[in-house]
């Protein structure tokens, strides 16, 4: 037997695929213990709201709360959050439409979920604030150097466009 045939036989490439290798992976069903409990979520949100004396973290409390609300209650993926821009949000109707998807899903946010977004936008200086209806990303990063506050648009926004 040639060396190639021996290798093929060794790796079973010359034989039919075993039947158990052709089945699609079936994830086990989710259990209640796989999810964060309401009491745990409340404790997380309460701890996130507490200032700790860090300028960057304390300034971004509302931003972080808004992101956690979208992920936890509307099941946004991190990619979805990073792609959000101001044209996707209708503040008056409290809706967010995810443009990259077809059909475009529209999410209705409750007052409890919209409040952190509104509060976050008011923490940004008016001249640097993302403008309603624009392609400005909703969530931005923060950097403080001395007394100069610099706000940078999140780098993921441009990498996904």
Image: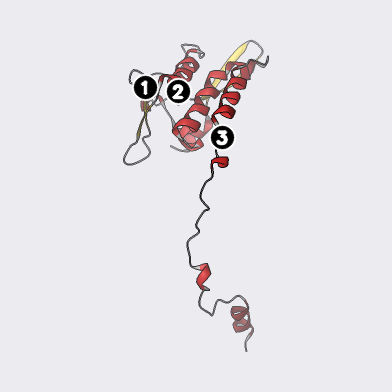
Place of residue 44 in the rendered image (x, y in percent of width and height, measured from the top left): 60, 26
**Vertical placement of residue 40 versus 54, above or below:** below
Which of the two discs, 2 and 1, labels the residue nearer the N terminus?
A: 1
Disc ID at residue 113: 2
| Residue depicted at 36% across the width and 35% down the height | 99
Q: Secondary structure at mark 2?
A: helix
The residue carrying pointer 2 sits among few (fewer than 14), some (14 to 19) or many (20 or more) residues within 10 Å by Cα, namely: some
**Which residue is label 3 attached to?**
36
Q: Are marks 2 and 1 in contact (CB under 8 Å)?
A: yes
Q: Is residue 92 left or right of residue 137?
A: left
Q: Indicate the quadrant where residue 83 lies.
A: top left
**Which residue is label 1 attached to?**
94
**Vertical placement of residue 36 versus 92, above or below:** below
| Residue depicted at 53% across the width and 28% down the height | 68
Place of residue 64 in the rendered image (x, y in percent of width and height, measured from the top left): 55, 24
| Residue depicted at 47% across the width and 16% down the height | 121
Place of residue 141 in the rendered image (x, y in percent of width and height, measured from the top left): 56, 24
Q: Quadrant of the N terminus?
A: bottom right
Which of the two discs, 1 and 3, labels the residue nearer the N terminus?
A: 3
């Amino acid at each position: 037997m040639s060396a190639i045939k021996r290798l093929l036989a060794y790796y079973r490439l010359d034989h039919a695929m075993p039947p158990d290798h052709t089945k699609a992976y079936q994830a086990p069903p989710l259990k209640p213990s796989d999810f964060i409990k309401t009491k745990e979520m409340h404790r997380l949100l309460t701890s996130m709201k507490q200032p700790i004396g860090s300028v960057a973290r304390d300034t971004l409390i509302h931003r972080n709360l808004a992101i956690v609300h979208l992920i936890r209650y509307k099941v946004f993926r991190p990619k979805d959050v990073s792609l959000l821009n101001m044209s996707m949000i209708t503040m008056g109707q409290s809706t967010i439409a995810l443009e990259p998807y077809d059909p475009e899903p529209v999410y209705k946010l409750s007052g409890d979920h919209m409040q952190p977004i509104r509060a976050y936008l008011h923490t940004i200086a008016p001249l640097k604030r993302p403008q309603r209806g624009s392609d400005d990303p909703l969530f931005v990063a923060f950097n403080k150097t001395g007394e100069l506050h610099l706000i940078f648009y999140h780098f993921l926004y441009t990498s996904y466009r």
